[in-house]
Image: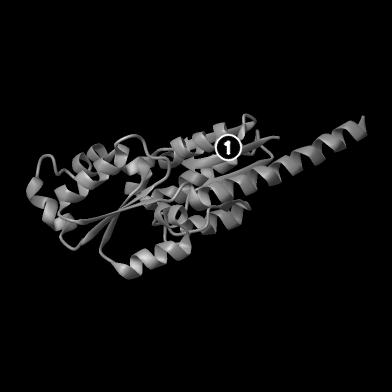
Amino acid sequence: MSAVIIACGALAHEIADLRRANGWQHLDVQCLPPELHNRPEKIPGEVRAAIRAARAHYESIFVAYADCGTGGMLDKVLVEEGVERIPGAHCYEFYATGPVFVQLADAEIGTFYLTDFLLRHYDRLVIQGLGLDRHPELFSSYFGNYRKLVYLAQAPEAGARERGAAIAMSMGLQYEYRETGYGQLGTSVTTFVSAADRIGQRSLGEVTWAH
């Protein structure tokens, strides 16, 4: 099989776990920097460039992104390039799955979401990334409208649940912990790999027959 997943760097750990657990050693993964989420307008162009570079080496390509704040521009690129992505607006939705995420949002629109990735990098991406280590007085400006923190856990490490609770307490938010597993990420990647395997088998059959 000649297949690659072009992934958001925030999903690298989770896709590596799926790859290892399923024995997909023939599957390649190329990650774009997770910091692109700070500039979502750049995501479509970066993904397009990665797809076009990958075409020289791979028959099957899948994009492990949701819309991720691109306002539909990523989907426009993917339609033009003929490549599919994970369904959903963001990783919180595809981890929780669409119906569950709607329930969470309806229950409390002012919810801050954590994933395993964001929990691991909370200090760097949130505290330092927003300058709160230098200007803690801005905390209420960023988070004053939030009421609840929901930790959507994929494969939490020891102590992760407690770490999430401590973050919620530091933000003055109610805390809810949910183990989601890999949600639609796992389903989408598995579907892609199965389809790529079938394409690879057909290609191999054609090469064998031609000789």
Is 118 on the left-hand or right-hand side of 183? left
The image quadrant where one finds the C terminus is: top right
Q: Position of residue 19 (x, y in %)?
A: 56, 35
Crowd class of label 1 (few under 14; some 14 to 19; many from 20; radius 10 Å): few
How was the colour assigned to the protein in this rendering?
A: one colour
Between 81 and 37, the one nearer to me in the picture: 37
Q: In terms of image quadrants, where is residue 71? A: bottom left
Q: Position of residue 172 (x, y in %)?
A: 14, 54
> What residue occupies the far left of the structure in this picture?
137
The image quadrant where one finds the N terminus is: top right
Q: Position of residue 55 (x, y in %)?
A: 64, 39
Q: Can you say whether 34 is above or below 87 in the image?
A: above
Residue lying at 53% horizontally and 59% vertically, measured from the top left:
76
Between 148 and 37, the one nearer to me in the picture: 148
> What residue occupies the far bottom of the structure in this picture?
106
Between 180 and 210, the one nearer to me in the picture: 180
Q: Which residue lies under the disc numbered 1?
A: 53
Q: Can you say whether 10 is above or below 183 in the image?
A: above
Q: Position of residue 5 (x, y in %)?
A: 56, 40
Q: Secondary structure at mark 1?
A: helix
Q: For the residue marked with disc 1, what is the amino acid?
A: Ala
Residue lying at 44% horizontally and 41% vertically, measured from the top left:
11
Is 126 on the left-hand or right-hand side of 100? left
Residue lying at 9% horizontally and 46% vertically, measured from the top left:
136
Residue lying at 42% horizontally and 44% vertically, measured from the top left:
154
Q: In terms of image quadrants, where is residue 79? A: bottom right
